[in-house]
Amino acid sequence: MLHDTGAQKYVNWEVTNVIQIKNKYGFRIVLHYLDGTKKIQQKSGFLTKKVAKEERNKTIGALYSGTYIVYTDISVNDFYVHWLEDDIKNRVRSSNTYNSFKNIVYNYILPMLGTKKLINISKGDVQDLYKVSALKSPSSVRNVKTVMNISLKYAVSKKMLSTNPAENVPLPKHIKAKPYRTRNINSQKTLTLEQLYTLIEASKNTPIYLQVLFNALMGLRRSEIIGLKYSDIDFVEQTLTIQRQLGKPLDVNIEEIRKKTLTKQELGLKTPSSYRTLKIPDYVFQAILEQRKIYEKNKSKRKKEFLDEGYICCSTYGHSRSKDFHYKYFKKLLEENNLPNIRWHDLRSSYCTLLLKMNFSPKAVSNLMGHAKELITVDVYGDNAQLITDNTEALDQFIQELTLLPYEEFDAVQDSNENISVIDIGTEIEQMFA
């Protein structure tokens, strides 16, 4: 196992002079850590004093350059156990993400490399690992490559390796590499504005109406949607602050959790950029107000049984929804309305691509989506030049017509509840970045 220092980085060091140790020669290295502890290492067994001095000079050079390997006897197995617990578990927010990393480690990396010493891993070993992983699937080997690069970069930072042996090791030739953090979007899996309108209208009489609105018109992730509370809304400024998600936490004591809520625990968000405050489109805001009336009615009706936790998307007893609650209703809506059989996440993609196609700033779209970098929004959602082009002209004409619509007529349409969805959706998307 790893040493008691917990693989922390040393902040200072000193090297003793060469001395005689058991009829041979050697020297000691003293590493000082930020918490005040120190670790003493001994390098000995050199036959002559000259050879020992040469090794001492190399060690000092490595310490000065920051390439000195502190941990030389760690097995790959012990390293990955430590890495998952010390690094990944502290960085990820949910058990799903943690288990994804863990599965790659235990199903691919350890079976091939687990018994080796970490410092003995070569680029050839990494290449062989990729070849074997590629036999299962292209996605598997890409995931293995990602985990290897991230984990061994960590090993370098903790002075377990001097260099990253996975760096610049290519995938097998028959596996096409993808650009960093990008993916292709199938235009058949992205809704046009007209299809989006059809879906929203059809979902009005279902329990997932607000979930559809939050996804399709505000680009929220499913775990963010079910974690929304009325307290997250500024009803004066008409804004929504995204500050939690619901999911299964790590290291949870099941006995302390209420029955059937293990996967509905409040967690932090995916990344720091996921914490964001968004303008709520009028159409969505009105739907929230209507849902709040229903919430209060159910609360009054079921005073003893109602769980008043303030979740916007909840059952008639106030219980938060599970992350998969939408599935059966969503798939039924798609089928009944002759819409493409898309995933729930593809609604978020539709929202993003519609905004990008309307020439909204990628930076603004990135902020709305809660992406870590503007590059991700453009690469992930903006590469496909043919995306929703079948609706571009209609969309432009639609927006132009909206700008010419008199306010009196707009109000009248609202009052009569006719075509309110088309008008509000169009104007709000157009005005969100005004």
Image (cartoon, helix red, strand yellow):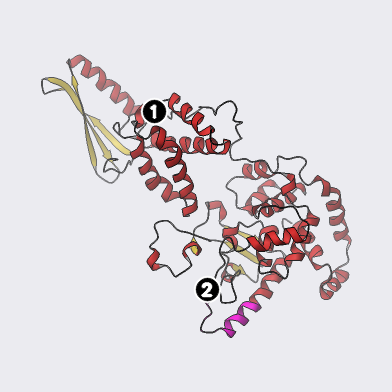
Residue 52, quarter of picture: top left
- Mark 2 and mark 1 residues within 8 Å of each other at the beta carbon: no
Instruction: Work out whether 202 lies above or below 250.
Output: below
Callout 1 amino acid: Ile
Residue 360 image point, x, y percent: 73, 49
Q: Which residues are magenta?
A: 293-308
Q: Residue 356, can we see it?
A: no
Q: Residue at x 73, y 58 (%)?
A: 334
Where residue 309 is drawn, which disc sits there? Answer: 2
275 vs 188, left or right, is: left
Q: Residue at x 73, y 49 (%)?
A: 190
Toward the viewer: 34 or 185?
185
Residue 57, quarter of picture: top left
Is residue 405 part of the magenta span, yes or no?
Answer: no
Q: Residue 135, can we see it?
A: yes
32 vs 403, left or right, is: left
Toward the viewer: 191 or 33?
191
- Residue at the left extreme, as displayed: 23
Is residue 295 part of the magenta span, yes or no?
Answer: yes
Residue 284 image point, x, y percent: 70, 66
Q: Give the quadrant of the C terminus.
A: bottom right
CA distance for labels 2 and 1: 51 Å
Dot 2 falls on a residue whose secondary structure is: loop
Residue 83 image point, x, y percent: 39, 42
198 vs 272, left or right, is: right
Callout 2 amino acid: Glu
Q: Which residue is mark 1?
A: 121
First in residue order: circle 2 vs circle 1 = 1
